[in-house]
Image (tube, rainbow, N blue to C red):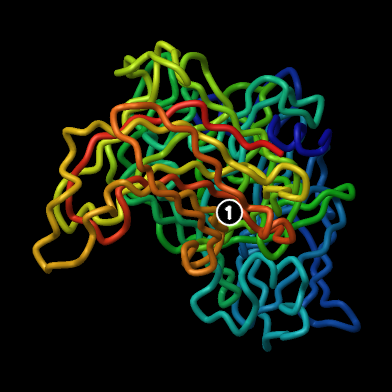
Amino acid sequence: MKRYINFISTILLMAFVWTGCDTEDPELGPAPTSEQVQFTMQPDADNPNLMHFISSSPGFKAIWDFGNGSSATGKEVTGAFPLKGEYTVTLTIFTEGGYAANSKTVTIQNTNPLMLDVPEYNLLTGGAEELAGKTWVVDKENSGHLALGPVGAYTQEWYSAPANSKSAEGLYDDEMTFNLDGFAYTYKNNGNTFVNTNNLAAFGGAGPDDATMPYTPKTGLTWSIVEEEGKKYLIISNGGFMGYYTGVSRYEILKLSENELYVRHLNANVAEQAWYQRFVPKGYSKPKPPKPYQVADLKEDFDEVGTIVWQTDQVKFNENYDNPAPLAPNKSAKVGQYIKQEGQAHEFDNLYTTLAYKMDLTSKNKIKLKVYMPSYNDYVTENGEGWAIKNLLKQVSVKLQNSEAAEPWANQEEVKQEVTKLNEWVVLTFDFSEAAARKDLDRVVIQIGGEGNFIPGIFYIDDIELTQ
């Protein structure tokens, strides 16, 4: 990291000089000339696609641009050129009086396929067989997909973005494609880029907060991976960048696998900041961890917050309805109102909850509930097709399903009860002891009024509980 900070300092010095400062300070001596910047280059004896460079120039700092998207510092360096072609290698020398640069052309006669068969290259690009390259996107489902910490530590102690928290910032539709062919890099941002507040000026913006800015990505970009002091860096050419813009093109690779790219990078305008980004391949969905298998805790009386989070499938449901008949066996103040609507679209109306675990039914396997069926419902009319369903509206069904199955209802466990008394609370018990051996059930469905029934009805339920 020290080497990188020195490199950044040098670049800032260069920027300062290039913006109008004289390249020569009389008190420090004359600035070097391009003629004084000399270096030799020699192909490796075993691999002509590796070139060894030695600077014979004066100065305290030597920076090399290999013309292939990668760079290095030092008097003696080695550049890797796996692809056939001509490359302009530039050496910049810094002395106490200023700086100067000189360039030479390196000609690589043949592509070296073995140099392309590098684990990091294959993981990043998909390898030689992926002609279109490999496209990465922000891992938005992962907490910490964008994070911030101090430069001096590898921690995200200052900020960690919750999952999907930047959905309005134009970050999640960015696509970054790395291709092994020509080491090409393509950034697709669909018209805008999420920019760090301290770097908004580069996009013509200003403000106290990060902002989504219109931007047309550069073309003809390349990528390279270099290793320095035991750390590997992913470098994008010509000011290119990945996702969240902080003014840098150099990303330390913290983790690179088939389905994960985790990088750390600096902020060009805030020296103490280190940012983190996580990426996954486009279209990749992380496998969900298996749900634990445990005894279910199901209890709901609608008077207080219970342990059940209800969801509805067509049915209308009110979890805080005044008890229409606060008499024994149910004198509670609040109950659940269940409204089955009319028509074929509502023949499968139901209420359900999906648990965060699989139900262990070996000890607790009976679901009890209270139901109230008003007499004003139409329990007589048959549906338009003449089905014999006069008593179907009086039916209460409880089903246990596997929510992770393609068709949860196909292999469900179902117990039905018919209510024979109207205008009073009735206690029903649904016995699932015969399903005690199953370990895949995580959804509880309550359906009133029967399946295939187009007749509407209003019902009330209360005191739902899984018991022994």
Name the spot of residue 25 as percent of width and height, x first.
Answer: 67, 22
Q: Give the camera-side residue of 158 and 434.
A: 434
Quick check: 58 left or right of 461? right
166 on left or right of 120: left
- Of residues 311 and 218, the one nearer the viewer is 311
Rendering quarter of residue 337: top left
Q: Note whether 161 is above or below 46 in the view shown.
A: above
Q: Position of residue 225 (x, y in %)?
A: 71, 59
Q: Quadrant of the N terminus?
A: top right
Q: Is residue 352 above or below residue 64?
A: above
Mark 1 nearby-residue class (10 Å; few <14, some 14–19, many ≥20): many
Query: How far across and down, in percent of the image, does residue 336 sit?
Result: 38, 26
Q: Residue at x 54, y 73 (%)?
A: 133
Q: Find the residue positioned furthest to the front.
A: 421
Residue that sits furthest to the left in the current view: 384
Specify the quadrant of the image occupied by residue 208: top left
Residue 28 location (% of width, % of height): 76, 22
Q: Is residue 35 visible from the viewing direction of this image?
A: no
At 67% from the left edge and 19% from the top edge, which residue is drawn?
158
Task: Name the secondary structure under disc 1.
Answer: strand
Taking the spot 58% from the left edge, 53% from the top edge, the residue there is 236
| Residue highlighted by disc 1 | 236
The answer to whether residue 28 is visible is yes
Q: Amino acid at mark 1?
A: Ile
